[in-house]
Image (cartoon, rainbow, N blue to C red):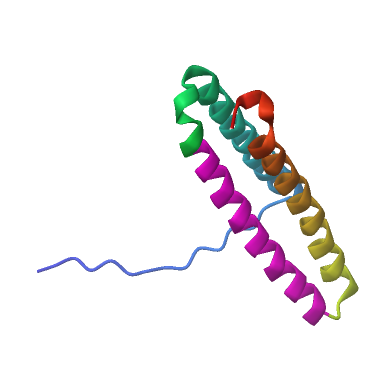
Amino acid sequence: MEDKMKKTKIEIRLTEVQKEDIKLRAKNKSLKMSEYILNKIYENPESTNDIKDLLRFNIKELLRLKVEYLNQKKECDDANKNKKIENKLVDLDKIITTLTAMLNDEEFNF
């Protein structure tokens, strides 16, 4: 006889503090990744082409995501949702600007 496990749905509700903690962890991971990339550039200048490709890919994906948010904003009539989307767009712009600056920074000999 086989034991069959019953699938159950688990709903997880997070407090605002937990949500903020998750956001901070995500930002820390992003900062660690940026630091990792910069360290790789300093350790091995020949690897900059791979890093340039990685930066270009990330910028392209973020721009695609930005277009999705802009389309959502056009379709949405709810002021609260529009404000949240606007905040996401501002964050995306900051990230795109930072990655573009990293890509174009002559100091790293790209």
The image quadrant of residue 29 is top right
Residue 93 versus residue 10: which sits nearer the camera?
93
Which residue is rendered at x = 72% and y = 38% of the image? 101
Whether 107 is drawn above or below 53: the answer is above
As for residue 37 lying within the magenta part, the answer is no
| 59, above or below 71, in the image | above
Q: Position of residue 52 (x, y in %)?
A: 54, 40
Q: Give the residues drawn in magenta, as a range.
A: 51-76
Q: Main secondary structure of the magenta part?
A: helix
Q: Position of residue 106 (x, y in %)?
A: 67, 29
Residue 84 in the figure: left or right of residue 18: right
Residue 65, image x, y percentages = 65, 63
Q: Is residue 21 visible?
A: no
Residue closest to the far top: 43
Count of marks overlaid on the render: 0
| Residue 80 as seen in the image, left or right of residue 2 | right
Q: Residue 63 vs residue 85: left or right?
A: left
Q: Residue at x 37, y 69 (%)?
A: 7
Left or right, residue 65 beside residue 72: left
